[in-house]
Amino acid sequence: MCKSTEACRACDQRLHSGRGSVFAAWTIGPYLVLQMLVLTWLATLVAYAPDGAALARWLPFMPDPLPEVLVQMSGEDFGAFRRNAIAAASAGLGGAVFMVREFYLAFAYGEPDKAGVPRFLHSHEIPRYVLLPLSATLLGPVGLALLQVGAIAFTGMTGERQIPIFTTVAVCFGLGFGYHDTLGGVRRWSRSFWSDAPVESPASRSAHTAPCAQPHATTSSSSPPPANPATSATPNGSPAAPPPS
């Protein structure tokens, strides 16, 4: 056997256990836990800060322009900033919880491939676990905007009244947890902007395609319609006499 092949197998045995890559596990696991703690901490500070000046004092490590902007914010502007920050943190937490579930299943049990063979965690999957929770934070302000315009509505709540904070947290967390489903819905929604053809409902499409599914009758198998005795003709071409009453 080639020495390079033996070296590759030895390296693979050092980096992988029976449940996948140990290096990937110790990189992804602590990162996801740290991200959830940081997002929860930031959301709590933003929720309980009375104004922008207090938040700037509580977060001294922010870049230079941001504390000045927070101090100069009015009460209304800081309220809008607070709602968007909480929405972004909630969506990021949803994405992180989703990836924790994916990480646990991939490392402990393996994800079955097309052939049904379990595929365990590998180091090349680290960027997916790192980037998905970060990109999920962008879905938070989108979900808040959909709530405010009434695109997402619940019983007893309209777009004119203030959105409750727990409603914002729950909706944005769900959008982040269902990251792929949310992007699929946004993709279908954005395609409607550029589509010239009207969108048909399933009922109208089935009504249009139903006649095409029926088999056409052939001439050889079709039988002639029954003759009307009042209008049928005799063999010499003269009309037949009407039946006696």
Image (tube, rainbow, N blue to C red):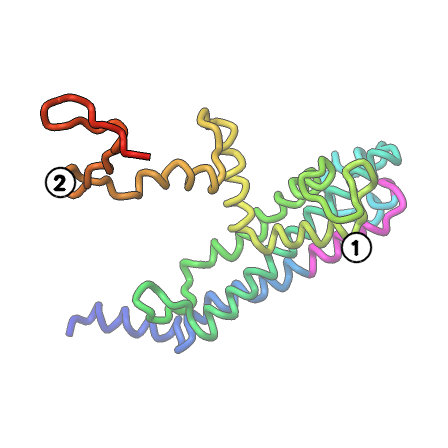
212 left or right of 53 in image = left
Discs 1/2, front: 2
Label 1 belongs to which residue? Answer: 44
The N terminus is located in which quarter? Answer: bottom left
Circle 2 crowding by C-alpha within 10 Å: few under 14, some 14–19, many from 20: few
Label 2 belongs to which residue? Answer: 220
Q: Tell me the chief SS of the magenta region.
A: helix
Distance CA(mark 1)–CA(mark 2): 81 Å
Give the image quarter of residue 177.
Answer: bottom right
Could you tell me residue 93's position as x and y percent? Answer: 65, 56
- Residue located at (29% from left, 34% from top): 244
Q: Earlier in the sequence, mark 1 or mark 2?
A: 1
Could you tell me residue 69's position as x and y percent? Answer: 79, 33
136 left or right of 118 in image = right
Give whichever of 170, 57 is nearer the camera.
Answer: 170
The C terminus is located in which quarter? Answer: top left
Q: Which residues are magenta?
A: 37-53
